[in-house]
Image: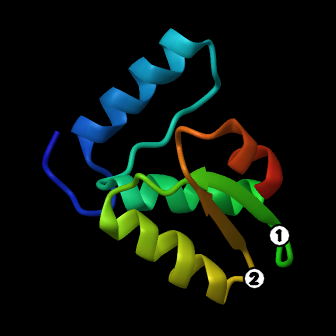
Amino acid sequence: PIYSRIGNPTCDALEAKVAQLEGGMAALTVSSGHAAQFLAFSNLMSPGDNFVSTNKLYGGTVTQFTHTFKKLGWEARLCGHDSFADMEAAI
């Protein structure tokens, strides 16, 4: 196969293998962790929803969670990773 920006044969092969290993009908690969996070959250969240996460994250993830997601109406409640009481309070 020839490389294409529309259908990459390397990605197609990886997606087919992941789907087979997981017993799924299909799989999707993306080029970055931020893209993966966005796809995962966009399938779960609606405007007005919130989620709890640790505050010990990569800086770009904190920005995505607290600024980009906020524009979509999603609230990130960040709390300490070593305190179950903080997590419970955030829930």
Asked whether the beta carbons under mark 2 and mark 1 sit within 8 Å of each other, the answer is yes
Where residue 52 sits, quadrant-wise, is bottom right
**Where on the picture, by quarter, is residue 70?**
bottom right
Q: Secondary structure at mark 1?
A: loop
The residue positioned 62% from the left and 12% from the top of the image is 23
Disc nearer the start of the sequence (2/1): 1
Asked if residue 47 is positioned above or below residue 43 in the image, the reply reads below
- Quick one: which residue is furthest to the bottom in this view? 71
Label 2 vs label 1: CA separation? Answer: 7 Å
In the image, taking residue 63 as reference, residue 2 lies left or right, namely left
Residue 45 screen position, x and y as percent? 77, 62
**Residue to which mark 1 is pinned:** 46
- Any mark on residue 73, and which? 2
Q: Count residues near mark 2 (Cα–Cα under 10 Å), then give few for <14, some for 14-19, many for 20+.
A: some
Name the spot of residue 57 as percent of width and height, x first. Answer: 39, 54
Picture disc at residue 29: none
Identity of the amino acid at label 1? Ser
